[in-house]
């Protein structure tokens, strides 16, 4: 084999390898959301009640005034019903009279609740999801009555609750 033919074969081979790597990288970026708690649809259906599954995984909304945490003001932490992450404190909850549990902030440094632009149903809103498992929580609005000005409007079906026995609640 001539030296020039050998170099040509090498060039074609490395080009093919680099193309494959680049297309693999492209397909990775097409995934809708990277979370550290990925489960299959079938696994979520086993883990959640049908109502929780509809809200958390299909972005459904419970009817206003029907959720168990709407008029719930015990001291404790509100968790993600999908993965158990503590998302909100009872200190952050307020009575918004909107029919859904409402919070004026979130626990942690802003890395537990992910905000996503939502243009569905002919509206411009900001959806909120659990950053760990991607579960739909509700929406966030900037019309809150407290100093933060924020209203995290959350479905009760997206939440769990851990009651605290002392006054050690921290935001
Ligand atoms: Fe979660």
Image (cartoon, rainbow, N blue to C red):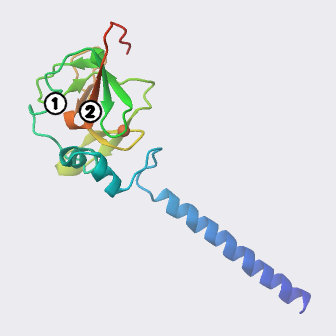
Mark 2, Cα crowd under 10 Å, few <14 / some 14-19 / many 20+, is many
Residue in front for this viewpoint, 115 or 133: 133
Q: Label 1 vs label 2: CA separation?
A: 11 Å
Above or below: residue 107 compared with residue 113: above
In percent of the image, x 37 and y 38: which residue is there? 83
User: Counting other residues with Cα less than 10 Å from the Cα at mark 1, is it few (<14), some (14-19), or many (20 or more)?
Assistant: many
Q: Is the C terminus in the top left, top right, bottom left or bottom right quadrant?
A: top left
> Which of the 4 image quarters holds residue 123?
top left
- Residue 66's place in the image compared with 51, above or below, is above
- Image position, residue 2 (x, y; %): 90, 91
Tell me the residue that label 2 is attached to: 159
Q: Residue 134 at x, y = what percent?
A: 37, 44
In the depicted view, which residue is nearer to us: 4 or 152?
A: 152
Query: In what element is the residue under mark 1?
Result: loop
Q: Which residue is mark 1?
A: 100
Q: Secondary structure at mark 2?
A: strand
Within the displayed image, which quadrant is ligand 1 positioned in? Answer: top left
């Amino acid at each position: 084999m001539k030296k020039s033919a050998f170099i040509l074969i090498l060039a074609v081979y490395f080009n093919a390898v680099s193309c494959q790597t680049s297309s693999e990288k492209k397909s990775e970026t097409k995934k809708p959301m990277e979370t550290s708690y990925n489960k299959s649809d079938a696994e979520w259906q086993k883990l959640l009640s049908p109502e929780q599954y509809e809200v958390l995984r299909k972005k459904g909304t419970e009817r206003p005034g029907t959720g168990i945490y709407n008029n719930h003001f015990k001291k404790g932490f509100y968790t993600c019903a999908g993965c158990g992450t503590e998302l909100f404190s009872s200190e952050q909850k307020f009575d918004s009279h909107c029919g859904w549990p409402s919070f004026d902030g979130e626990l942690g440094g802003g890395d537990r609740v992910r905000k996503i632009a939502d243009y569905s149903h002919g509206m411009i809103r900001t959806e909120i999801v659990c950053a760990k498992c991607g579960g739909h929580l509700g929406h966030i609005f900037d019309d809150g009555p407290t100093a933060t000005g924020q209203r995290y409007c959350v479905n009760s079906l997206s939440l769990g609750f851990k009651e605290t026995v002392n006054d050690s609640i921290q935001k």
